[in-house]
Image: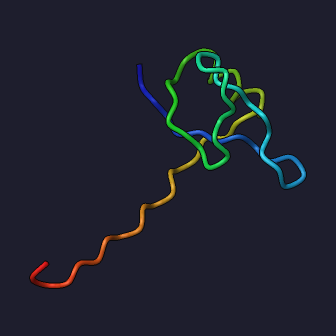
Amino acid sequence: MQNFFIKPRTIDGAPALVRDPLSGLPLDPAGDHKPRSPFWIRRLRDGDVIEAQPAAEPAVITKPGD
């Protein structure tokens, strides 16, 4: 099964509370990779979550010779 990156929609500037059906934990407001399962597809269709791109990780700068 494919994964996709989703995050909760915002309601009045605050992330919606959407719980993972397996862990019971809320979806991270910054988003997370989740399986493209019927549960998450329904959440997407109902507008509880949005498909997004993960934030770019900061580049690690090293000095020559390190």
Residue drawn at point x = 29 percent, y = 77 percent: 61
Q: Can you name the residue that lies furthest to the front here?
A: 66
Q: How many marks?
A: 0
Q: Can you name the residue that lies furthest to the bottom here?
A: 64
Q: Quadrant of the C terminus?
A: bottom left
- Give the colour scheme shown: rainbow
Residue drawn at point x = 73 percent, y = 30 percent: 18
| 7 relative to 65 in the view: left or right | right
Q: Can you name the residue that lies furthest to the right here?
A: 12
Residue drawn at point x = 86 percent, y = 46 percent: 11
Q: Is residue 19 above or below residue 57?
A: above
| 14 relative to 8 in the view: left or right | right
Q: Can you name the residue that lies furthest to the left here?
A: 65
Q: Position of residue 51 (x, y in %)?
A: 60, 41
Q: Position of residue 28 (x, y in %)?
A: 63, 41
| 65 relative to 56 in the view: left or right | left
Q: Is residue 11 above or below residue 13?
A: above
Q: Position of residue 8 (x, y in %)?
A: 71, 40
Q: Position of residue 50 (x, y in %)?
A: 67, 40
Q: Quadrant of the N terminus?
A: top left
Q: Is residue 58 above or below residue 13?
A: below
| 18 relative to 28 in the view: left or right | right
Residue drawn at point x = 49 percent, y = 24 percent: 35
